[in-house]
Image (tube, rainbow, N blue to C red):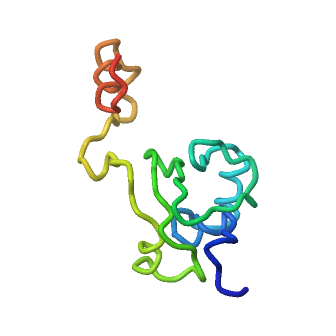
Amino acid sequence: MSAPESHSGQRVDRWLWCARFFKSRTIAARTCVDGKVRLNRRIVAKASVQVRIGDVLTFAQGREIRVVRVAALAERRGPASEARLLYAELGETAAATGVTAERESGSGRPTKRERREIERLRGRDA
């Protein structure tokens, strides 16, 4: 495949895989088809949607919601240090802030008070 050009774009599933957000391209494509990726606030329904430099992608990665701006298009899936140059992180992740809203396994359902605290930690004030 030739080097990507900024005006033509790149498939969203391939870009997500090259940027090392997903372990395989198949997983990245399935995430797109399932409607779990947003491109400039619009739900992506196909893995073949083109991303361009400056676009904003929003998607779930594990228990975190990632919001990234496309800084460059990928020529190949290189090492993590090279992949980090493909995007700029926009949203604050829970890992970066040190705030988590996890409960111990087997501790039962949260009480109403605990649910409100969890929502407050997630930034959704009730």
Does residue 120 sit above or below 77 in this rendering?
Answer: above
Quarter-wise, where is residue 115 in the image?
Answer: top left
For this rendering, which residue is in front, 73 or 36? 73
Quarter of the C terminus within the rendering: top left
Left or right placement of residue 115 versus residue 59 in this view: left
Horizontal and vertical percent for residue 77?
57, 79
Left or right placement of residue 122 versus residue 71 in this view: left
Instruction: Name the residue furthest left.
Output: 98
Instruction: Name the residue furthest top.
Output: 112
User: Image point 40% across, 79% down: which residue?
Assistant: 81
User: Image point 44% across, 80% down: which residue?
Assistant: 82
Left or right placement of residue 55 versus residue 65 in this view: right
For this rendering, which residue is in front, 61 or 71? 71
For this rendering, which residue is in front, 11 or 97? 11
Left or right placement of residue 54 versus residue 32 in this view: left
Quarter of the N terminus within the rendering: bottom right
Horizontal and vertical percent for residue 106?
39, 30
User: Image point 48% across, 71% down: which residue?
Assistant: 86
Horizontal and vertical percent for residue 8?
70, 71
Horizontal and vertical percent for residue 10?
67, 69
User: Image point 35% across, 32% down: which residue?
Assistant: 122
Instruction: Name the residue furthest bottom.
Output: 2
